[in-house]
Image (tube, coloured by chain):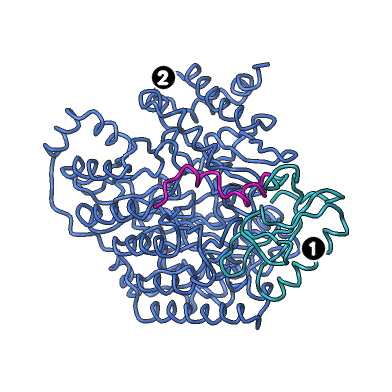
Chain colours: A blue, B cyan
Amino acid sequence: MYEYDDIDQTLVDERVAQFRDQVARRLSGEISEDEFKPLRLQNGLYLQLHAYMLRIAIPYGTLSSRQLRGLAQIGCTYDRGWGHFTTRQNLQYNWIKLEETADALADLAKIQMHAIQTSGNCIRNTTTDQFAGAAHDEIEDPRVWCEIIRQWSTFHPEFSFLPRKFKIAVTGSPNDRAAVRVHDIGLRMHKNAAGEIGFEVIVGGGLGRTPFIGKTIRDFLPKQDLLSYLEAILRVYNQFGRRDNLYKARIKILVHEIGIEAMREKVEAEFAASKDGALKLPQDAIDQIAAQFAPPAFEKLSGISAEYANAFRTDFEFGLWARRNTFKHKQPGYSIVTISLKKEGAPPGDASAEQMNAVADIADRYSFGEIRVTHEQNLVLAHVKQSDLPAVFKALKAYDLATPNVGLASDIIACPGLDYCALANARSIPIAQQIALRFKNWERAHDIGELKIKISGCINACGHHHVGHIGILGVDKAGEEFYQITLGGAADEQAAIGDLIGPALNTRDAVDAIDTLVETYLRLRNSSDERFLDTYRRVGLAPFKEAVYAVA
Amino acid sequence: MAKAPKLNSQPQVVTANHLLSGDVVYLTKAASWSRRIADAAVVANVEAGAALLAEAETQAKKNIVIAPYLIPVDASVTPPKPIQYREVLRAEGPSTEKARPAA
């Protein structure tokens, strides 16, 4: 894992001191709320419905056990003993006091963490594949490149006041688990014809009010040119991106308005002028950072472990969990474990301090002390020996962390919604809870198979509803919560924006509609291997729409 | 965010967030702030609402609260109940927290 050097630590410590001073000046009246607001936002502090909310950056979703314990402690000291993992691989505390925020940030700095780049019109915390450095299908560990992007982008003076926020995601695998096609810039690592590894650069993707799938601006970018090319894109965006209309200020609108060819022309011209300049990455600098992401000391194992095989055969619950919540590791004898934070009926993505501490302990014992956060609001133990899986399952189960539902209908993404968020129009969490409870029966849930339901409480789409196999968007209709349903969205390498099924439904009808959609799928699917999304792509919207709205 | 309805001559109270804690607060008859909507000063016409808001804005300038605004309430019940669901949630807390054991 990456460890701070003196520069990183000084930067974060100084930032805490600056913020402490800014709060003091706000409280003394020296600066007004209007002057203070951008300053607090630049430190991740939002004012939500009931309290301040502090959003902590978890760079590329990687945490050490020490950091996770620190987050648990901060949750106890400054919040109500909880943390909420978000679709940006970050963590939010929902009950923060302004007067204690600088102390919370100081505690974070002690564990090499901060809230920088979690708000404001800057380059936000870079996200990636939660299985980075572990997945069997990976070409290269994308976190090396995320860290390089972090070092380049943090407090970048030219890009601290962009037209709007800017999100970059990186995948090192052809199977995209980082939703790179719906980010401002998506980077997909792949090999060219000569066998060299580089990046496909995708630009102008995004969700929100106007969703777009990103377009490829460059098929292959050599690694050493990464920062020069990113800087060229940012520079073009900074110059031509709209500042006259908040809703048209993201790079996706620029790309849409001028077209990808014109965008490419401008970016390539900028890149040509600067590509061999100061940002060209020297190999030794890359190697230095890559060394910090070196694989842990794996044991040399072969074959299937007897403990694992035995537990799989004899312990039904374990088998169910292992089938859904583990993923193939590149190292023989190891597995990747996804810890579901989606116990049916619980708020998606929430973890208590006790659970965070338990995960930290389990990670220390079984997974080299490392934890990942997924954009689907779960946690991951990236390197677990298969022979340890039964013990890990047992340990997780003791803390309600072994729900065997990863990728299933109850593994729902949901934004905080109107229960917490000042921007929301409708609640997200309660409808997620109600839907998840409908799929609590394991037999039915496993028979349905992969089904990604994503819920947002407003058009800003923090819950990624546009790219849900089933997407749900909360709207306000004359003071009542209604929900629009979309079908056929996807966030992976075949990214797609979902199609609106029809008029919005009230809460009860929306929950019933999800059941109806699933029953319709079960009736229409060719076989149990055909996923909901596959069936939808084969048969289209009509039979689903008919089923939902036919009931008089 | 749902649009705030235009207020006519109907029961209304002033709400804001407390600067230090971020807590939801309501302006009381004594021109102080309370976390309980039960303590809120309820007025029933446009002019009185404007006067109440003016008082609140003075206090915002003194760095006690942030961004005060008027909300319509149903004053026939005790405590007064906000008309908009968003304000009900602000008054009562998140609907999800009720089901959650205190840590």
Kind of residue indicated by mark 2: Ser
Residue A345 percent location from the top left of the image: 44, 37
Up-down: is A353 above or below A388?
A: below
* Residue B54 among magenta residues: no
Q: Toward which corner of the image does residue A470 lie, by quadrant?
A: top right
Give the residue number, with chain letter if any, for mark 1. Answer: B52
Please give the range of residues in magenta. Answer: B85-103
Q: Quadrant of the N terminus of chain A?
A: bottom left
In the image, residue A284 lies at what x, y percent? 32, 75
Helix, strand or loop status at disc 1: helix
Give the letter of the chain under mark 2. A
On the question of residue A406 being in view, the answer is yes
Q: Which image quadrant for residue A50? A: bottom right
Relative depth, front residue between A357 and A169:
A357
Point out the frontmost of discs 2 and 1: 1
Q: Nearer the viewer, residue A321 or A480?
A: A480
Tell me the CA gap for discs 2 and 1: 66 Å
- Asked if labels 2 and 1 share a chain, the reply is no
Q: Is residue A295 above or below residue A448?
A: below
Q: Residue at x 43, y 55 (%)?
A: A83
Q: Which amino acid lies under the numbered mark 1 shown in the image of this protein? A: Leu
What residue does disc 2 label? A527
Which residue is located at x 68 percent, y 55 percent? A253
Left or right of A322 on screen, residue A31: right
What's the residue at 46%, 66% (across, down)? A226
* Residue B91 belongs to magenta span: yes
